[in-house]
Image: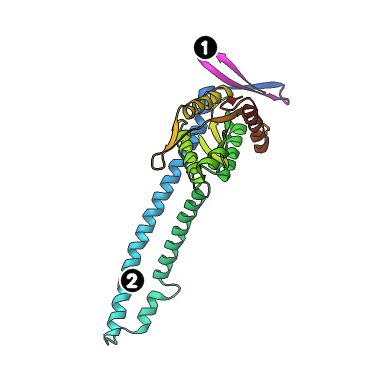
Amino acid sequence: MIFDLDTSNGEKYFRLEPVLELGLIMVGGTQKDELKELPLSIIKAGIIISLIGLIISLLIINSFSKKLKVYLKKLSILIEEISNGNRSKNIEEILVYISDDSELKIITKKVKNIQKNVRERELKAIARMDSLTGVYNRQGLTTFLEDEIIKKKVFQSDFSIIMIDLDNFKNINDVYGHVFGDFILKGICKIFMEETSRLDKVCRYGGEEFIIILPDTNETDVFKVGERLRGEIDSREFGNKEKKIKTKVSISGGVIEYEEGLSIEELIDRADKLLYKAKRLGRNKILY
């Protein structure tokens, strides 16, 4: 059994665990703020470890590259001496440097393996990004939602999502063209990134639909974020100076706090229903 309680020194989470064999009940408690800080610490530690790993990989590559240059230089000298008629340097000496078990080959393989691992990490990061807008794509969305659901199970940490759709976006494409439509999408995403925290994840769900994941955020707070985004976009005018095009844009959205036991599909479906209710009620609205 888990419950929270206001105490003299702040809100606490308590957990009751019966020990049937002894006829006892074990009680444990922790500060709510401390519980929320733990996932952030884990995330920060993960980022730091990744950066350290990348730096170490680059240092190793640099070290191997220097060794590689030395061996290549020696090999070059051998070949040059043979080409100049110096028979004291025979072909066997060259084979020492280029055989399959030579140090040159071993170093070369290690460098290639490290480069491959670094490249694979880069490709994984690129695979999660939307090439047009620069925000995360649907693959990234799924990964981040899976991570947040695990954090909810382990740490009981809240998270919420905002599902957003641009109002009448088809009309913008029809009137001004798809190039200007892409310009609008990039401008909208820039606002999303500016108006959310660095821990929030802005993802393109498809077309002109976006989902923003907000860790450690309840339904009330996520609604405030959604309203701020809606108001900011509604107050701006989007235009292309070269083509002298100007237009207003609005968004509709649905916000929902994750409930334990929901699947990713069920969570998105609930937000989607709120989004389309906002559309039916006249657009330019955020509902929860």
Q: Position of residue 199 (x, y in %)?
A: 48, 34
Tag 1 secondary structure: loop
Q: CA distance from mark 1 to mark 2?
A: 72 Å
Q: Position of residue 121 (x, y in %)?
A: 48, 51
Q: Are marks 1 and 2 in contact (CB under 8 Å)?
A: no
Which sits in the foreground, 177 or 252?
A: 177
Q: Give the numbered dot on residue 72.
A: 2
Vertical position of residue 131 compared to residue 15: above or below? below
**Residue linked to disc 1:** 8
Residue 145: which quarter of the image? top right
Residue 243: which quarter of the image? top left
Q: Which residues are magenta?
A: 1-21
Q: Nearer the viewer, mark 1 or mark 2?
A: 2
Which sits in the foreground, 238 or 85?
A: 238
Q: Quadrant of the N terminus?
A: top right
Q: Position of residue 102 (x, y in %)?
A: 41, 72
Which residue occupies 55% across, 24% down?
A: 223
Q: Amino acid at mark 2?
A: Leu
Which sits in the foreground, 179 or 105?
A: 179
Tag 2 secondary structure: helix
Q: Is residue 2 magenta?
A: yes
